[in-house]
Image (cartoon, rainbow, N blue to C red):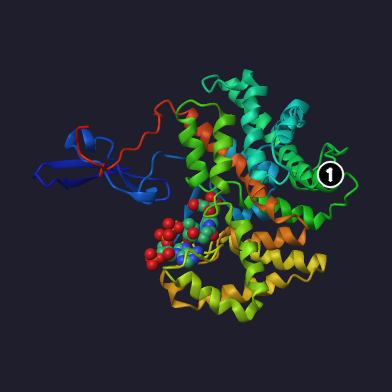
Amino acid sequence: MSDVAKLTMPDGKELTLPAYTGTEQEKCLDISALRKETGYVTFDPGFGNTCPAKSSITFLNGEAGILRYRGYSIEDLCEKSDFNAVMYLVIYGELPTEEELATFLENLQKYSEVKPQLLKLYDALPQDTHPMIMVSSMLAGLSAHYPQFTNPQNEEEVEEAIFVALGQILPIVASAYCKNNDKEFKYPSDKNLSYGAGLLKMMFGDDYEVDADVDKILDELLILHADHEFNCSTSTARLVGSSQANIFASLSAAVQALWGPLHGGANQKVIEMLEEIAGEGGVEAIDKFLGMAKDKSNPFRLMGFGHRVYKNYDPRAKIIKKTCDKVIEKLGVEDPLLAVAQKLEAAALQDEYFTARKLYPNVDFYSGIVYRALNIPTEMYTPLFALGRLCGWIAHWREQNLDAGARIGRPRQLYVGPTERSL
Ligand code: SDX
């Protein structure tokens, strides 16, 4: 359905803007002729009011706290599906039949080992390199090792490149952990493990026993991180891909964007913040940190709180919070940070500064507590976010790449620098 909006310019010129309505009744104005017709561009720092494309992958409603992949709610997918099927759904648009899933996993298995020469890239990096640098470098390196799959205009090549990226992200993430922890990296003997179980065995050794509940919990976390429409890192993958850079280059760039502490890097920062609060008196120090978060002269922000789109409780955070309680009980771990997190959340949700700005816990607030319970080191939290989100980046890159009307992304500016002057 499309209707129109009328725009009257300062010089009195009238412009008719087509308006579109999406399948979930969201509305947008088409301003693609604005500059040509009026010489004006729009000003929208952070793109909070701008959609660069139509998409069929993920729907989220920030006010109602709704998140669906290809129409299926995350609640349903966490309960009735698994991450392997969700990867397929997010990328290809439908849940796979048993046969389709088997073929998909066989294709990933074809590329489930990283070329030994590529692994040598780690030797060029300092010992304590952050694993997000290692993961991004390795993804970029796949362009060099699989040049035959780097032509975005060849659909068969793109499909094989997708299998390479999905097949190798697991050993790439796990080998980065092993390298940084002086462990020998080995592939698991069982070739039919879930992503989560495969990761834990590659990180902690082939004889590491993966508890079935822990496997399910990790699988659920991967589902919850799979996609989130046009967030910063997904928009990065799309923008890089819009220049017809290959998919490996676009994914490598997306990893770097995700690493930012305002984005996926927040899951590591949340734990570091909770450790800092615990070190300064724990629950007694909460008011002090809330005060810092509210003080505009202080750069401190409450990590794991707030969201550009969710002005309600992040539906993923709700599920992860329940999972957090389950895993803590299952593993019988006592984590003092959990008590600090719960008290901090309760205090913030009663504080007018946070409620007035609709700042609620987001996906990153509790995920780190779950990873801690699984003895996963803090610096691996954001790589685990990337492990889940890879299929979402791929889905968006592929959707744009298949769109015959897609153009190179090239935003404009409002120039406020020096006017012409002579030397
Ligand atoms: C992810 O986009 C996605 O979908 C991302 C993601 C995904 O799945 O891809 O959901 C994953 O990145 C989750 C967010 C993780 N980041 C953090 O937890 C970092 C802490 N949060 C903030 O930095 C912030 O809330 C952002 C970055 C998440 C959102 O930033 P916005 O939308 O630009 O919000 P804003 O800076 O305009 O804030 C609005 C107001 C401001 O105060 P006022 O100027 O109105 O007085 O809220 C304040 C901000 O100062 N504010 C915070 C705050 N977040 C916002 N104040 C204290 N602590 C915070 N965390």
Mark 1 burial class by Cα count in 10 Å: few <14, some 14-19, many 20+ = some
Residue extending farthest to the left is 12
What residue is at 63 percent from the left and 45 percent from the top?
386
Which amino acid lies under the numbered mark 1 shown in the image of this protein?
A: Lys
Can residue 95 be seen in the rendering of this structure?
Answer: no
- Residue 187 placement (x, y as % from top left): 83, 37
- Residue 29 placement (x, y as % from top left): 29, 44
Quadrant where the image shows the C terminus? top left
Can residue 374 be seen in the rendering of this structure?
Answer: yes
Q: In which quarter of the image is residue 148?
A: top right
What residue is at 63 percent from the left and 72 percent from the top?
277
Q: Dot 1 corresponds to which residue?
A: 183
Residue nearer the viewer, 354 or 120: 120
Q: State left or right for residue 74 relative to residue 242.
A: right
What residue is at 60 percent from the left and 46 percent from the top?
226
Indicate if the residue with disc 1 has its beta carbon within 8 Å of ligand 1: no
- Residue 361 placement (x, y as % from top left): 55, 65
Q: What element carries label 1?
A: loop
Q: State left or right for residue 128 relative to residue 192.
A: left
Residue nearer the viewer, 51 or 19: 51
Residue extending farthest to the front is 423
Q: In which quarter of the image is residue 330?
A: bottom right
What residue is at 46 percent from the left and 35 percent from the top?
239
Residue nearer the viewer, 279 or 337: 279
Residue nearer the viewer, 319 or 115: 115
| Mark count | 1
Quadrant where the image shows the N terminus? top left
Q: Is residue 117 above or below residue 15?
A: above
- Residue 159 placement (x, y as % from top left): 61, 26
